Amino acid sequence: MIHSAASASALQSSTRRPLGVFAALGVLIDLSVTLPGNPDFASTRVAVGCLAVQALIVWRLSRQSQVAWLLGFGLPVLAVLAIYLAAVPLNVSTVLFLLFCGAQAASLVRPPIIRSIWLRRAPLLSRPAAARGGHSAPG
């Protein structure tokens, strides 16, 4: 599928809100982990590291990276699965964590994100010469 510059710009602007939601939910996940009663909270250094990884995923998502989408979708889903398999007792921080993880994964399956990441443009060489910005040979 070939997009014009205007449609690519509109597509990019339609992905800003879901990516913002994804990023905000990542911060909320980190805050829910730091709530009292969570014995697994390691340190502030780990929290900063988690924020850095999440920022990297959001940045790569904004650049339409399929690997970043897989990580951004897969990590929250795997976290929910791990909580379930470990039979972690439900308390406020666990419930918030599960809700935020579910919402974060759901924010990446919105149609603008799916179109932006998975429905890529045709490779540069398969487009007509005029679309590449080159000149076609006179015929």
Image (cartoon, rainbow, N blue to C red):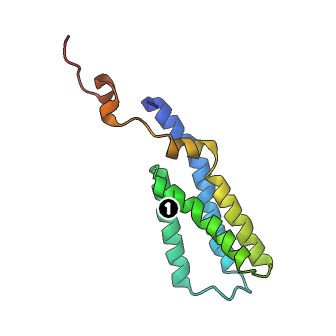
Up the image or down, 66 lies above or below 38; here it is above
As rendered, which of 30 and 85 lies closer to the eye?
85
For the point 46% across and 31% down, the residue is 1
Up the image or down, 122 lies above or below 53; here it is above
Up the image or down, 110 lies above or below 104; here it is above
The image position of residue 56, as x and y in percent, is 46, 63
Q: Quadrant of residue 81?
A: bottom right
Q: SS at mark 1?
A: helix
Q: Quadrant of residue 121?
A: top left
For the point 50% across and 76% down, the residue is 49
Residue hosting label 1 = 57
Neighbour tally class for label 1: few under 14, some 14-19, many 20 plus, Cα within 10 Å: many
Q: Is residue 6 left or right of residue 33?
A: left
Q: Is residue 79 left or right of residue 8?
A: right
Q: Residue furthest top?
A: 139
The image position of residue 15, as x and y in percent, is 56, 45
Q: Residue furthest front?
A: 85
Q: Quadrant of the C terminus?
A: top left
The amino acid type found where label 1 is placed reads: Ile
The image position of residue 29, as x and y in percent, is 65, 70
The image position of residue 119, as x and y in percent, is 50, 40
Q: Is residue 28 left or right of residue 67?
A: right
For the point 57% across and 46% down, the residue is 113
Count of marks, rendered view = 1
For the point 52% across and 77% down, the residue is 48
